[in-house]
Image: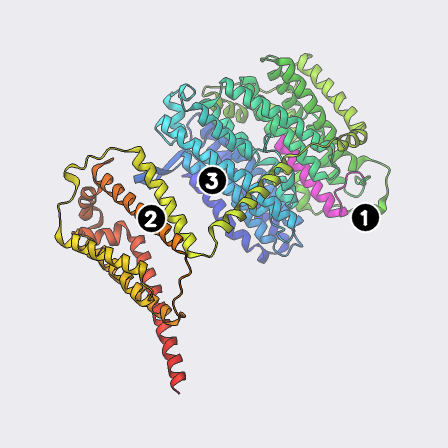
Amino acid sequence: MLLISTLLILLLAVPLATVSGRIPKALRSWVLALPALAAFVIILGPLGSQVLSGNQPSVSLEWVPQLDLQLALALNGVGWMLALLVTGIGALIMAYASGYMDKYPHAHRLYAYLYLFMLAMVGLAFADHLLIFFIFWELTSISSYLLIGFNHENESARRNALQALLVTGMGGMALLAGLILLSNVTETWLLSEIYSSGIDVTASGAYPAIFTLIALGAFTKSAQFPFHFWLPNAMSAPTPVSAYLHSATMVKAGIFLLAIMFPILGGTVAWTYTLSIAGSITLLLGGYFGLKQNDLKKILAGTTLSVLGLLTLLLGIGSEKALLAAIVFLIGHALYKATLFMVAGSIDHSTGTRESSILFGLKKAMPWSAAAATLAVASKMGLPPFLGFIGKEYTYKASIYGDDAWIVTSVLILGNAILIALAIKAGFIPFWKKKGDPSQFKTPHEVSWSMRIGPLLLASLSLVFGLAPATLSPLANAAVATMLQQGSNTPLHLWAGLNLPLLLSVITLALGIFLAITNHSIARMLNKITIKSGDQVYQMLLDNVLRFARWQTRLLQSGYLRNYLLIIIITAAVLITFKLWRYPSFELGDNVESFSWPVLLTSIAMFVGIALAAVSKNRLTALLSLSVVGFGVAFIFAAYSAPDLAITQVLVETLTMTLFAWVIYKLPQFRQFSSNRIIAFDAVLSALVGVLVTLLILKSKALQFAPSISETIAAWSYPEAHGSNVVNVILVDFRALDTLGEIIVLTIAAVGVWALVKNTSKATSKTDS
């Protein structure tokens, strides 16, 4: 039950965050961080020991047994790694946010949203049932929308939040379809059972569709090309959000999805080429975007894009070395990128600007922030003895021994070199550059300890794990073992001797420093290149969708009742015609009811009523004629043993006739507005639809696609609902919401009639007086 307990801790943290304003300021940051820290300790300790021992922690609680839906949770190696990042970094982000958002009037909302997001991400790491996984997946999108649009008075924040929600939401719908297809092929909803079943999903005819749909979900969430454009725009969120969601956690959800799907969908040509190509393009696109920027957060957003592309590329390669490299690089990136984002927020908080081109000499006023940034930049640059160096070494070990090694390695060298240049630009220059104009920003000062502790600790961990990589080996190998579905015990080393990967690292470092030195010229050159960005394409598509929606609304919501009826009737006629064309034969047999004189006479009376209503020049006569049709339908319901429908029809018909009578009473003298041609068209269309409906009813009587539900309901009546009257059980239990809706409709209609009668009585009294 530790899995559920962890989720409950994070769930209870949401209401705690909403009342955080009442906590004394000196204690607020530590109290806010406590739930996340408690969850981290549980995941690292008791749950982690079970993962490492091979006894996968799991729990399953019945939810909707009829739908085979359980609250099934299980923690594998990849999920363990993600949950540790989410809660560990999350605790530090909560402490940081309390200092950064101190003067925001509604900061408590941000804290609550952050914990809601944390809950969703940990749930994603724990989920074993595919539908539970999808629920948490969508919760990450919703909570991210709330966080990106936190400054909702800003039009840009609202627009970017909607963009992120639409892109990731559409990917989520694709993912749901893919998970449903995967469940159909494997005949189970549990990820652990799919792993253990040994079913080769890649050999299924549905594999192309499953892979495409799941890849769409992963690509949209992790901002892979061509869905990369939403991530830089999401930087309109407050800095704690950017540091947490879009560097360390949310954007890693797509990578996490690809990692857990690797044993099921990986190893094919489609997997390798799709992920490798998309990852390579995203890696270089992120660098292109970052080199053009001067805003610290946008520079870091570009590097996040690049790293996400690099991780996707490594998963596309799919060898054991590549998977290990992906895990190590992912952890290293989470540590140094969250640090750099928090430092960028501290700089903005202190100086009032994030423009790297005007910032300089901040190390004197902000020594602690400078120390954290320097350590993070060193790891990001891949300098020994930092974890970033190990991650970069392992990426080259993975690339030089695979297919198309020279292409992949060249992409990695260029991408990593750009990352180095951007690390210097975002984390080194603002502190260590000596010359500049101090009047362009406020006098800097060091931030509070609640804003320092997170960057310092995460940056220090990059050094600690680099010096002692063996401490990280169990976590990395557990994640790789999950992806390979076999044991993995590859020790991590800081120094592997003089070899080709080391040479490539040196070349990358030299190229990165060169790009950093010439960045001003490169940025000026890149800004001259005009490429239609993904954001522009998105806006064009959204504008066209809205334009089509306005046109459709004008067409469908014309305000003319006849048009509404024509749309409904013609649509029904087309659907009925399709069904009759699909099943053209008529073998009515014994399913047709025996002849009934009362029903025949009632039908004739209804036809006469219809004819009178159509030709009558008096509204009251037309209304009474139509009521014959309504009460005739009620009689037919009663004749065919549907007394509940008959009673409902009588009540509705009576209320409708009463309401129309009051309306008619107020209308002016009758005038014929429709031409004879329109009346003739309406008559022919009505007759045609009537014939089609009749044929459909006769055909439905001849077909039986499934066993009759009436016998099943009768059998369920007493044991399931404890009622011997089947009709009552249907109304009160099996279709209780439908019955409730009918009661509400009748109540509203009765209130409306009462109001009409009351108002008319008052008007009559005033006239008499």
Alpha carbon separation for disc pair 2 and 1: 82 Å
Q: Residue 334: give x, y in percent of width and height.
A: 61, 33
Q: Residue 85: give x, y in percent of width and height.
A: 56, 35
Q: How many marks?
A: 3
Question: From the viewer's perspective, is 268 left or right of 302?
Answer: left
Alpha carbon separation for disc pair 3 and 1: 44 Å
Residue assigned mark 3: 136
Q: Amino acid at mark 2?
A: Val
Vertical position of residue 241 compared to residue 496: above or below: below
Question: For mark 2, does the 10 Å Cα neighbourhood hold few (<14), some (14 to 19), or many (20 or more) residues?
Answer: few
Residue assigned mark 2: 684
Q: What secondary structure is marked by label 3?
A: helix
Mark earlier in primary sequence (2, 3): 3
Mark earlier in primary sequence (2, 1): 1
Q: What secondary structure is marked by label 2?
A: helix
Considering depth in this image, is 478 or 173 the residue closer to the camera? 173
Question: For mark 3, does the 10 Å Cα neighbourhood hold few (<14), some (14 to 19), or many (20 or more) residues?
Answer: many
Vertical position of residue 231 compared to residue 306: above or below: below
Q: Amino acid at mark 3?
A: Phe
Vertical position of residue 405 compared to residue 681: above or below: above
Q: Quadrant of residue 601?
A: bottom left
Magenta range: 333-357
